[in-house]
């Protein structure tokens, strides 16, 4: 099976022009077929506040009302996505910017209201991996922002980590898929105050132990939940760390396997 790398970058890299440009060079040099997934929450919050729209969060997750959805669509699907696509073109990567509505690639259900009404937030229902593969087969590099749709003309704000793992699961029907979650830490840390305490390999048994010890908590929880969901559904390996893990030289990051 041919290899496919799916790389996700977070908001802190997108916010920093120099870091973004450095990352995109590493992404461009990554061998073989690849897909990029990005968020942009911080930029959306800044622009919303310039427009006098307050950003509401519950447990670190954004409440997406109709006004916020307009801002997210402009920022994720426009400003951030097209800026990334233009920079990749300058690096000779024929990138194509997408939401889940494009080519009907990712459909979601609007999240049901339980304790919290998250508004126009989507939970991924289906990935059309054949549609995405047509783009890859035509030598395009898909660049997905964190927006999906429900098939009834409604766009939905969707967690970028989840999009990454769901697209990876879909594409694993056709490819040997590896995920790279790039963020500012060197990997999953044993001690949050020691940036060099990287746990280099986590399998399902160690994952259970780390959960019980409370070492995996907060923002790492959904990342690792998504990871094991992907691994249980056909994805081969998942890597977490800073952007230098995309080079051959750096081996100080976390690799996650079953």
Image: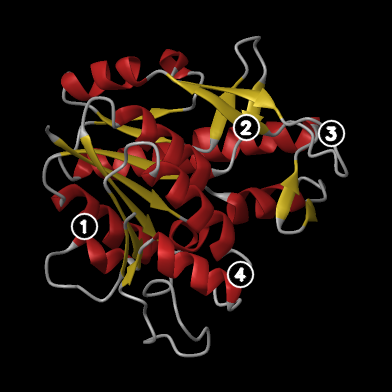
- Real-space Cα distance between discs 3 and 1? 41 Å
User: Residue under circle 1?
Assistant: 26
Instruction: Pick the quarter of the image with the C terminus.
Output: bottom left
Instruction: Pick the quarter of the image with the N terminus.
Output: top left
Disc nearest the viewer among 4 and 1:
4
User: Residue under circle 4?
Assistant: 217
Of pointers 3 and 4, the one earlier in the residue sequence: 3
Residue 210 picture location, percent across and down: 51, 73
User: In the image, is 104 to the left or to the right of 90?
Assistant: right
Visible residue check, residue 209: yes
- State the mark number for residue 113: 3
Image quadrant where residue 173 sits: top left
Residue displayed at 36% across by 87% down:
196
Q: Depth check: 195 or 197 in front?
A: 197
Of pointers 2 and 4, the one earlier in the residue sequence: 2
Disc nearest the viewer among 2 and 4:
4
Q: Residues within 10 Å of mark 4 (few under 14, many from 20)?
A: few
- State the mark number for residue 123: 2
Q: Please, is residue 115 above or below residue 255 in the view?
A: above
Q: Residues within 10 Å of mark 3 (few under 14, many from 20)?
A: few
Q: Residue furthest top?
A: 152
User: In the image, is 139 to the left or to the right of 215?
Assistant: left
Residue 53 picture location, percent across and down: 81, 46
- Real-space Cα distance between discs 3 and 2? 12 Å
């Amino acid at each position: 099976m041919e290899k496919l790398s799916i790389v996700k970058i977070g908001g802190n890299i997108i916010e920093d022009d120099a870091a973004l440009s450095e990352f995109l060079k590493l992404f461009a040099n990554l061998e073989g077929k690849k897909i990029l997934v990005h968020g942009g929450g911080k930029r959306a919050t800044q622009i919303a506040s310039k427009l006098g729209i307050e950003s509401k969060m519950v447990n670190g997750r954004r409440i997406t009302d109709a006004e916020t959805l307009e801002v997210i669509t402009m920022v994720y699907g426009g400003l951030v996505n097209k800026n990334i696509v233009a920079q990749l073109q300058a690096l000779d990567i024929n990138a194509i910017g997408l939401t889940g509505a494009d080519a009907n690639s990712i459909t979601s259900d609007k999240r049901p209201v339980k304790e919290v009404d998250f508004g126009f937030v989507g939970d991924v229902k289906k990935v059309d991996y054949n549609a995405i593969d047509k783009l890859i087969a035509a030598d395009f590099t898909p660049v997905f922002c964190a927006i999906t749709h429900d098939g009834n003309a409604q766009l939905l704000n969707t967690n970028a980590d989840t999009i990454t793992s769901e697209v990876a699961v879909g594409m694993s029907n056709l490819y040997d898929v590896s995920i790279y979650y790039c963020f500012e830490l060197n990997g999953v840390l044993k001690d949050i105050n020691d940036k060099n305490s990287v746990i280099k390999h986590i399998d399902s048994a160690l994952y259970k132990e780390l959960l019980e010890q409370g070492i995996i908590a907060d923002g790492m929880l959904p990342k690792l939940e998504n990871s094991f969901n992907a691994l249980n559904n056909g994805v081969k390996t998942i890597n977490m760390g800073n952007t230098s893990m995309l080079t051959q030289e750096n081996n100080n990051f976390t690799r996650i396997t079953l």
